[in-house]
Image (cartoon, coloured by chain):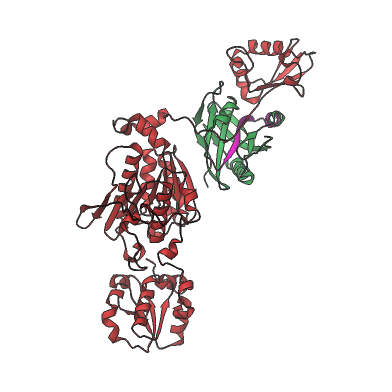
Amino acid sequence: MAKVLIPTALRRFTGEQDSVEVTGGTVAEALGQLTTQFPNLKKNLYTDEGKLRSFVNVYVNDEDIRYLDKDQTELQGNETISIVPSIAGGAAGVAEPPAALSNEEIARYSRHLILPEVGMDGQLKLKQAKIILIGAGGLGAPLGLYLAAAGVGRVGIVDFDVVDASNLQRQVIHGTSDLGRKKIDSAADKMRDINPNIAIDKFETGLTSENALDILKDYDIVIDGTDNFPTRYLVNDACVLLKKPNVYGSIFRFEGQATVFAYEDGPCYRCLYPEPPPPGLVPSCAEGGVLGILPGIIGLIQATEAVKIILGVGETLKNRLLLYDALGMRFRELRLRRDPDCPVCGHHPSVTKLIDYQEFCGVKPMSETKPAGDAITAKELKEKIDRGDNFLLLDVREPHEYQIARIPGSKLIPLGELPKHLNELDKDADIVAQCKSGGRSQRAVDLLKANGFKHVRNMTGGITAWSNDVDPSVPKY
Amino acid sequence: MIEVEEQPWRAMVAHAEKTFPNECCGAMLGRIQGENKRVTEALALENAYAGAQGAMYELRPEDLLAADKAAREKGLDLIGIYHSHPDADAYFSQTDLKNSCPWYSFVVLSVKRGKFDHANSFLPDPDQTKAEKEEFVWPKF
């Protein structure tokens, strides 16, 4: 009698026997006997036409019968017959699963499917769509949550930041338990929890002229959720060069803007703003503050535009800049036009590849632009205070910021008021200017120097650095 | 439903990350009770594919036979096969489907830029025409 070893996976069909004794002169007869005895085994080993399934290999002792006489291999009666599946695979060059909705997805998207404007076709378009979010912050938070819920098949996220306490007032994709985690990880977890069907690509990096085209090229739509001018121009130019729509949004204090740039024959960001503002003129949200709810509204306008572009329904914001004022609770629109002389998307573009956007926007790291003698660190300031030096510590923040935190002994003159108060200050005095993180105080230093003040220095990192490096009891905001 | 215990899961993830940018493969051993499968041990196997292994794997039948034997000796079941998709999602590709076997759960680990990203488990049909996603539980840390 030959012995057939039953793979563990098939033992449920043999009454849990791990081997079965069979008679028969050939492998075919032996297996025939086995499947007669255990009929449920048959469909696991043979096709409906009665051929051994392609994944089934049969070994007699240690030999594969394909190299013997196949199923006519003769048996003496003392052999051990093994059944071994052949298994291989891989992600190789193969299309992703066919475009169809599973029953779970049909249930999930039911409220979309019954909208004639979406329907099965539209939901499949969403499933096949690829969107990339630049930033997982204020705007990226609602975008990520709702695009995942809506069933966008693939979402890329570009962000190198970690979740900070000051983010939680508006970045609702991150929670208190995510403090200190990478934003891309925290965001991806929330999005997969909402919808496990979506694929997420995480790019833990800043977007740069070197990597932007490579990162963005695989996506259909780019959504700009950044908060600085260099990246905004970079995203715009990359979208124009790659011919991808750039769904734009920006927020500040109580006001927001949204539109769709570089879409079809519409204008790009540079048609609206050919040149960046002088550095420091427009404060960031970190400097000027932002109503926590605002990015929710603007981000969801961006999400709506992206979904409309995918579905091909409705009228997008192409050629229109939507302005939102939360305090007045008003929406307004400005008409936009493509500029035929636009340096990127005009008839004769002068920008045909990505440039250095830090330089374009006049932003350079402090150390490169300012001589060292102009700056003082938080620790050096502490030593100076401890030495009892006679100097003026000039805080150029706003009064409500001064209420939150201050460095002892500082004098408050908000940057905007400074020109009116120049004559109250001594031009020969030793002055250190300080703000929240070093931006506004640098402008104060420039202003003072231009007005003949001789010994003025900027405190790098502002009161945030003071809290980090000198006195942790000073709150950071 | 298939559930992987922490120790084998750590081994599978480490194997997939170590093998990146190539595909890794291995066997999952454990216990089956009705529809519930619990993986208690992971067995790394060699990717025997003769060409570039960045997006392909192949198991040697002898290795699979040995894995099945190892399971037998420990009183465990060979529950399934795992493999990785470097810089690709954890879908069941046509290559996976056409070289699958309906007796096992197929766990696919997506590894992006060298780090584990997510995973799915699939149950292919005997005709290799489709694979159902299987409820899959792995330890989160």
Residue A461 lies in quadrant:
bottom left
**Residue at (69, 35) in percent of width and height:** B50
Q: Which residue lies at the image location 33% right of the left edge and 68% below the top edge?
A: A281
Number of numbered discs overlaid on the protein picture: 0
Return the residue nearer the eye: A323 or A138. A323
Chain letter, red in picture: A
A64 and A61: which is toward the camera: A64
- In magenta, the rendered stretch is B67-88
- Horizontal side, residue A330 vs residue A302: left or right: left
Q: Residue A311 lies in what quarter of the image?
A: top left
* Residue A426 sits inside the magenta stretch: no
- Picture quadrant of residue A35: top right
Which residue is at the far front?
A348
**Relative image position of residue A273 (x, y in whole percent):** 32, 59
| A449 over A350 or under it: above or below | below
Image position of B109 (left or right of A142): right
Front-lying residue, A168 or A232: A232
Image quadrant where one finds the C terminus of chain A: bottom left
Which residue is at a point 21% across and 58% down the rendered structure image? Answer: A327
Above or below residue A179? Residue B6 is above
Give the vertical position of A29 relative to A262 (above or below).
above
Does the rendering let one see residue A199? yes
* B84 magenta-colored: yes
Q: Is residue A304 above or below residue A22?
A: below
Q: Position of residue A345 (x, y in %)?
A: 37, 52
Estimate the x, y position of residue A396 in percent, counting from the top left. Answer: 33, 75
Quadrant housing the N terminus of chain A: top right
- Rendered green, the chain in question is B
> Can residue A409 be seen in this snapshot?
no
Residue A304 drawn at (x, y percent): 31, 44
